[in-house]
Image: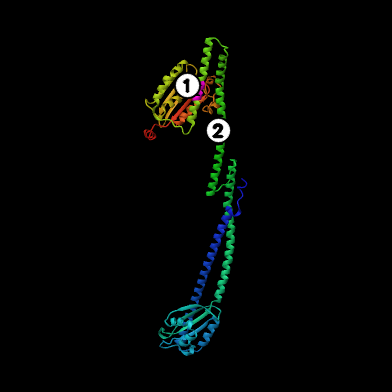
Amino acid sequence: MAKENKVRVYNRLFFKLYLNYAVMLLLTAVLICLIFIQLYKDTAMKNEQEKLKQQAINISEIMTTNYINTNNYSGFLDFLITLQKSMDLDIWTISNPNAIIPMDESMETNSFEEFSVDYREYAALVTSAFQNRYEFSIADDEIYQTQTITMAVPIYGANREVVGALLMKTPVKVLKDIIDDSLSLIVISSVVGLAISFIIVIIFATELSLPITRMRSTALSLAAGNYHSKTGIKRNDEIGDLAKTVDILSEKLLENEIQRKNLDQMRLDFFANVSHELRTPITVIRAYTETLVDGVVKDEEKVNQYYERMLLECKSMERLVGDLMLLSRMQNPDFAIDKEPVNLVQVFDDINRSITTLAEKKNIKIDITKEQPVIMMSGDYDRLRQMFIIILDNAIKFSDEGKTVYINISKTDKITVSIKDEGIGIDTNDLENIFEKFYKSNLRQNASGTGLGLAIAKQIAIKHEGSIDVDSKLGEGSCFTFTFPIYNMDDMDDSSL
């Protein structure tokens, strides 16, 4: 058993739970971090583009309003230099060769032909601006040694004619630094979150694995025969339900163990009782046989008496063995009686004819009350007759002369048969045991009994899906009450198929 308790660490449930949840959390955190970083980069870059676009549009409007439409170009160069220094931008103005009135040369404009040669990578942007479109590009710049964003917007003249293009370029190094700082913050937050999550996982895995470990220990204890073991787990979840099931199993095993011990004891008692019941007649028969064999008794009348006594003892043993065999068959769960429609009134009419002789010997009256002339039930006629005769025989045996035995047969939602006598009654301490095998009181009336009659009667009642109850008081008599289900023709038809 100790060898079974050794489980490698990597095979333990706690380790598997922790590893699975840890890997899941780690992958989730990394995935979320990567997605967030990419989204942050895209958002930051888009915001920078919108910002540069708006700046370019504003500068273009200023140029149109303050310089081009007024034909006053003084101060434009200073304005342009100031913008480049304050905003850390490279700014070009390119004249549109296709415009009716191109930009004035005093605005430090570049001709499109020259610009296309010197900065051919931006020619497409300028062409788009000439076509009244806003375009941008992102590329690595050798001068700045970083990525740059270049924005081209149209410059308007009179009648909103595109007279030129404004090209603005700015490095994204500052933006990259912000993204890197944000990335560091995200990574640190993720690490802290993972650490907290791992602690939570440890707590969760412990709460999940410890009850299972306790249930395993309880199961091993039960397997070792300690049926008093309990998990002691009180939880309102599936693990709690499983723990309750293990505890119920423990209780059932304990009950079965107690029942097994009781059955073993009953078996020992049974053999002891059988031996005791058989010892007396065998001893008597042996004594008489030895006497006859030794020739001690010569008188023919005496010899005949010995033979009669031996025959009586043999019949007693035969009855005992027959009762034991019958009781054994009746207690077998696989034993089934042959049922058919039976009229209980007819059964008692038959019993009354058989029991009258025995009752007349003690001047005992049998009073039968039948609420209906026909009361049908499903059963075995001979077994029912045997069961009621056992009770009536006891009622007559334990009643004084001149008394009455009352029999009542009624039918409501069930069939009820009561047999009441005016005999000596049964002691309260004996009531719990009267249906046990070989149980006999110390009364002289029980001297010739086997102690199996009431046990057989109870088994017959059970086989008929009925019950037998007894109510008795010393000096007042006893009342045995049988209860059976109502006879149902459909049920009979089904059972006979």
Q: Whole-percent x and y of residue 410?
A: 41, 27
Which residue lies at the image location 57% right of the left edge and 27% below the top edge? 272
What residue is shown with label 2? Answer: 263
Amino acid beneath label 1: Asp
Q: Is residue 289 above or below residue 133?
A: above
Residue extent of the magenta highlight: 316-322
Amino acid beneath label 2: Leu
Task: Specify the quadrant of the image occupied by residue 257.
Answer: top right
2 or 1: mark nearer the eye: 2
Q: Earlier in the sequence, mark 2 or mark 1?
A: 2
Q: Whole-percent x and y of residue 147?
A: 53, 77
Q: State the quadrant of the N terminus.
A: top right
Q: Residue furthest right?
A: 2
- Is residue 361 a member of the stretch shown in magenta? no
Q: Whole-percent x and y of residue 68?
A: 45, 87
Q: Is residue 137 above or below residue 346?
A: below
Secondary structure category for the residue under label 2:
helix
Q: Is residue 5 above or below residue 390?
A: below
Secondary structure category for the residue under label 1:
helix
- Residue 152, can we see it? yes
What residue is shown with label 1? Answer: 393
Is disc 2 surrounded by few (<14), some (14 to 19) or many (20+) residues within 10 Å? some
Which residue lies at the image location 54% right of the left edge and 40% below the top edge? 252
- Is residue 320 a member of the stretch shown in magenta? yes
Given residues 12 and 434, the one toward you in this image is 12
Task: Specify the quadrant of the image occupied by residue 368.
Answer: top left
Given residues 374 and 329, the one toward you in this image is 329
